[in-house]
């Protein structure tokens, strides 16, 4: 290591890097000082509310917002979609008002009059034969000769139907903004966003398209804290533009427009569904020979996305696959943590698990036997991770052939799954500022979703400067700071660690140059250690950090760190393995998680604590979509039936009785790869692992997630151990 | 309607609409936005505050129902000099949060538990927090945070 000037320090010299550092945003969050967008209250602020369409598919015949405008306390009202507009989902925004308080705004919205021509809709897609011309081909591919492989009389073949419905993001803080005009040509937004640097140009373009003239450079976006995004908060969204228009109409007064929970669940984020018939074949010794899948899904009115199957084992020699995208009136899809992967993972790993059962093979052995079909750079990682997961889950003790033969109604089972993700750092930048009094600031227009971005920046800067983590002041969440990419696709830690490192190394070199004469050496002979600038390996020839910075005189060091940039600080492509251990009550159909084991690599870890937290968080989201989450659409009324948190259920603290066991793969073989993102990977496998564990417990596959009591009992009625 | 409420030790008098929810009263009139809004329907617990020492979901209480009561919000939990309450410290030290949106509600629900049961088992902690949802953390660290705080509170009580 350290052959390139920005390289990560060698093991043993990494200071805080790789250790457990408490998140630096902790005190603000536990004391209520952290202000989320929902909490922003500006002087003279108005409250925005929207009228939304009650129909899944309709044309607007007439609309009149004037009664709302006349209502006392209303300061602005506007039509969002005018007469003639075709509405494609229930909950779509039609008109909006801004009033002195929330209740008045709600009253006023009810006064708006709209007439619709109601058109036919489709909101359920799981039965492809009923989807008619809403179903469009979305890709077909053939590799090798699958027909021949399936026709081989020696082949063991398993066929199954698997499905995963549309789910929502359900961030605890709903979507929304507080927008105000600062004079005639300048805007400030407080936005609940994963994309602080990107919002100004989105809003600027949207307003200019409406002939409202404002330059991107005159729009500032702030988001210090955000209550979850998970891929659903990259855009200013129509309601953000509406807030800006309402504010303008009201003379520039700040307008707070946060979605209500029901609006949020109905329109602000759906993960595409994925259903399919899969056929897989192996030779008698368990070597996979062929894959065939006919799949479909919906991403609302737009395309559904195409999950990459067969997942991981992409080198199966004979493959046929066909995907169909069904356009529906359910509201648009949004990126959901690891787009397409959880769906592909379930479809593949459940089908392979059924094949292993048919071969009477141990599922773990089956994966080990076929793991050479994974991309070559991951094979080694998976082999090690499968062994580690087997050890941590006590696989050989608890796994049994399909169907727990223990008497009684409680059946225990184990299931395994694996996953991958890219996670290379996005393009972005920061300022690093070292002042003569020794204070250090890192500024970037990035954001901390609760993932630990702030802490990662502080750890990297502190470790570079040889300072304690709390000596670094981190300023983010404001678009006036240097541009950084959106936080999506596990790209933030790779970017933030790299630009902080590059900017900090450059700043340190400037400091060395300023200090070298007084230590009587060349700048390149200096190092930063334990709060001192010293001659390499000679602490007796040194200055304290403060004294060293004082040598700057009136000068302040200001460098800009960028990503991408010189030296390889990050990489791409991680592997992970998870094992679920469940107990199923065959009388009630209830699935209980005993343990979830997650073995994960992510290259070089910056903060072990926030890294592990990401994995815990991924696991719980995985449990949520495996057992509870489904956007339940009603074909008759065309609306979501469970647009509230009572019936759109998330796992509570009591729903995981057992333990989450997280093991990070670190050390030689992993650290050298540099930093790789971790937000997405751990959320991918739980669906397949839990589904496989349930099949192992009760002896029959529950074909669709979520594994609700009703579905479990229905599967048991058809077979398995009851 | 006129109401008189003692919030974090300070008495306020306000004239409020009968339909005003306590959560909005706290956030908008009293300016205490640490009490968050998640579900609006009494499910998520993000809006949990202490009303006369008992944890309530403030989106389910009308401001007028709080007339004459004492309310503690997350902002009122720290000591005078900003010293964090053991629960606040525990959630930080033990990493019981990610985005932090659920955290104030979690802490106040846990506060009620510790005031009633200074020695909670893990199962009792889980039971006590069943009304609070978190989308981020996986809960495991939240349990640890409450255990950490329970121990600290006991230690403080022994010293006192
Ligand atoms: S906002 Fe009150 S319980 Fe969710
Ligand atoms: S930390 Fe995000 S909801 Fe709990």
Image (tube, coloured by chain):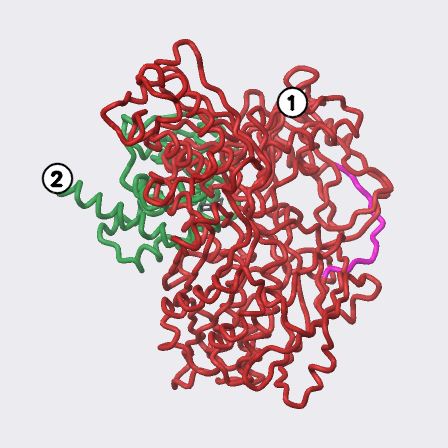
Task: Inspect the magenta stretch and tell me whether residue A544 lies in it.
Answer: no
Q: Residue at x 71, y 22 (%)?
A: A215
Residue at the limit of the structure toward the top, as seen here? A554
Q: Residue at x 80, y 35 (%)?
A: A64
Q: Residue at x 50, y 30 (%)?
A: A476
Residue B32 place in picture, x, y as percent: 43, 30
Note whether A233 is above or below A482 in the view shown. below
Task: Inspect the magenta stretch and tell me whether residue A114 lies in it.
Answer: yes
The hue used for chain B is: green
Residue B130 place in picture, x, y as percent: 40, 55
- Displayed quadrant of residue A84: top right
Residues at circles 2 and 1 in contact by the CB criterion of under 8 Å: no
- Which region is colored magenta? A112-123
* Crowd band around label 1 with a 10 angstrom C-alpha radius: few (<14), some (14–19), many (20+): many
Report whether residue A565 is seen.
yes
The hue used for chain A is: red
Disc number at residue B159?
A: 2
Q: Residue at x 65, y 62 (%)?
A: A308
Note whether A513 is above or below A340 in the view shown. above
| A687 sits to left or right of B97 | right
What residue would you read off at disc 1? A187
């Amino acid at each position: 290591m350290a052959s390139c000037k920005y390289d990560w320090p060698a093991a043993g010299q990494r200071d805080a890097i790789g250790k457990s550092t408490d998140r630096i945003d902790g005190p603000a969050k536990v004391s209520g000082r952290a202000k989320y967008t929902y909490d922003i209250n500006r002087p003279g602020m108005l409250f925005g509310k929207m009228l939304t369409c009650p129909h899944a598919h309709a044309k607007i015949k007439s609309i009149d917002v004037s009664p709302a405008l006349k209502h006392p306390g209303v300061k602005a009202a506007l039509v969002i979609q005018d007469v003639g507009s075709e509405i494609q989902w229930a909950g779509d925004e039609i008109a909006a008002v801004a009033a002195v308080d929330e209740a008045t705004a709600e009253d006023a919205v009810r006064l708006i009059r709209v007439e619709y021509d109601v058109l036919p809709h489709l909101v359920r897609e799981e039965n492809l034969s009923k989807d008619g011309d809403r179903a469009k081909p979305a890709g077909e591919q053939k590799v090798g000769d699958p027909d021949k492989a399936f026709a081989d009389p020696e082949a063991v073949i398993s066929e199954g139907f698997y499905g995963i419905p549309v789910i929502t993001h359900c961030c605890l803080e709903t979507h929304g903004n507080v927008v105000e005009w600062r004079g005639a040509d300048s805007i400030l937004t407080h936005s609940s966003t994963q994309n602080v640097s990107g919002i100004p140009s989105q809003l600027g373009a949207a307003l200019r398209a409406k002939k409202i003239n404002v330059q991107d450079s005159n729009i500032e976006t702030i988001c210090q804290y955000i209550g979850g995004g998970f891929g659903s908060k990259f855009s200013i969204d129509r309601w953000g533009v509406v807030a800006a228009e309402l504010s303008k109409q009201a003379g520039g007064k700040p307008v707070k427009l946060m979605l209500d929970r029901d609006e949020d669940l109905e329109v602000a984020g759906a993960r595409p569904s994925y259903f399919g018939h899969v056929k897989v074949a192996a030779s008698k010794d368990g070597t996979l020979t062929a894959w065939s899948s006919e799949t479909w899904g919906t991403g609302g009115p737009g395309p559904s996305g195409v999950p990459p199957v067969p997942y991981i084992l992409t080198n199966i020699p004979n493959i046929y696959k066909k995907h169909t995208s069904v356009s529906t009136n359910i509201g648009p899809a949004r990126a959901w943590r690891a787009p397409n992967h959880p769906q592909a993972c379930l479809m593949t790993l459940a089908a392979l698990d059924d094949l292993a059962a048919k071969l009477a093979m141990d599922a773990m052995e089956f994966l080990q036997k076929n793991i050479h079909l994974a991309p070559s750079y991951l094979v080694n990682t998976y082999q090690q991770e499968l062994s580690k997961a087997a050890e941590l889950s006590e696989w050989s003790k608890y796994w049994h052939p399909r169907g727990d033969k223990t008497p009684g109604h409680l059946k225990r089972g184990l299931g395994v799954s694996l996953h991958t993700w890219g996670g290379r750092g996005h393009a972005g930048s920061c300022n690093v500022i070292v002042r003569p009094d020794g204070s250090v600031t890192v500024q970037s227009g990035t954001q901390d979703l609760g993932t630990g971005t702030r802490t990662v920046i502080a750890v990297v800067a502190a470790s570079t400067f040889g300072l304690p983590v709390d000596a670094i002041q981190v300023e983010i969440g404001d678009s006036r700071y240097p541009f950084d990419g959106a936080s999506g696709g596990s790209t933030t830690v790779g970017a933030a660690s790299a630009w902080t490192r590059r900017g900090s190394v450059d700043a340190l070199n400037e400091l060395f140059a300023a200090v070298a004469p007084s230590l009587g050496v060349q700048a390149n002979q200096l190092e930063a250690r334990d709060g001192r600038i010293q001659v390499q390996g000679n602490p007796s020839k040194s200055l304290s950090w403060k004294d060293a910075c004082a040598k700057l005189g009136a000068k302040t060091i200001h460098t800009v760190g960028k990503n991408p940039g010189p030296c390889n600080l990050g990489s791409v492509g991680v592997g992970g393995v998870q094992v679920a251990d469940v107990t199923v009550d065959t009388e009630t159909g209830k699935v209980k998680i005993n343990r979830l084991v997650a073995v994960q690599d992510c290259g070089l870890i910056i903060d072990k604590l926030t890294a592990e937290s990401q994995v815990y968080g991924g696991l719980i989201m995985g449990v949520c979509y495996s057992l509870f989450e489904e956007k339940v659409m009603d074909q008759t009324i065309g609306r979501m039936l469970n647009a509230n948190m009572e019936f759109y259920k998330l796992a509570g603290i009591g729903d995981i009785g057992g333990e989450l066991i997280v093991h990070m793969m670190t050390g030689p073989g992993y650290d050298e790869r540099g930093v790789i993102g971790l937000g997405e990977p751990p959320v991918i496998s739980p669906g397949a692992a839990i589904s496989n564990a349930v099949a192992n417990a009760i002896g029959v596959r529950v074909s669709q997630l979520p594994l609700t009591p009703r579905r479990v009992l229905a599967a048991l009625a058809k077979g398995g151990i009851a | 309607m006129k109401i008189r409420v003692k919030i974090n030790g300070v008495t306020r008098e306000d004239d409020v609409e009968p339909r005003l929810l306590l959560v909005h009263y706290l956030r908008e009139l009293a300016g205490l936005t640490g009490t968050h809004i998640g579900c609006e329907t009494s499910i998520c617990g993000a809006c949990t505050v202490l009303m006369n020492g008992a944890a309530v979901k403030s989106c389910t209480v009308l401001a007028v129902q709080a007339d004459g009561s004492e309310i503690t919000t997350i902002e009122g939990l720290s000591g005078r000099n900003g010293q964090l309450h053991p629960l606040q410290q525990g959630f930080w030290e033990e990493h019981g949060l990610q985005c932090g949106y659920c955290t104030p509600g979690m802490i106040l629900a846990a506060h009620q538990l510790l005031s009633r049961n200074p020695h909670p088992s893990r199962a009792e902690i889980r039971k006590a927090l069943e009304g609070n949802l978190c989308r981020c953390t996986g809960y495991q660290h939240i349990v640890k945070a409450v255990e950490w705080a329970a121990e600290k509170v006991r230690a403080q009580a022994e010293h006192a």
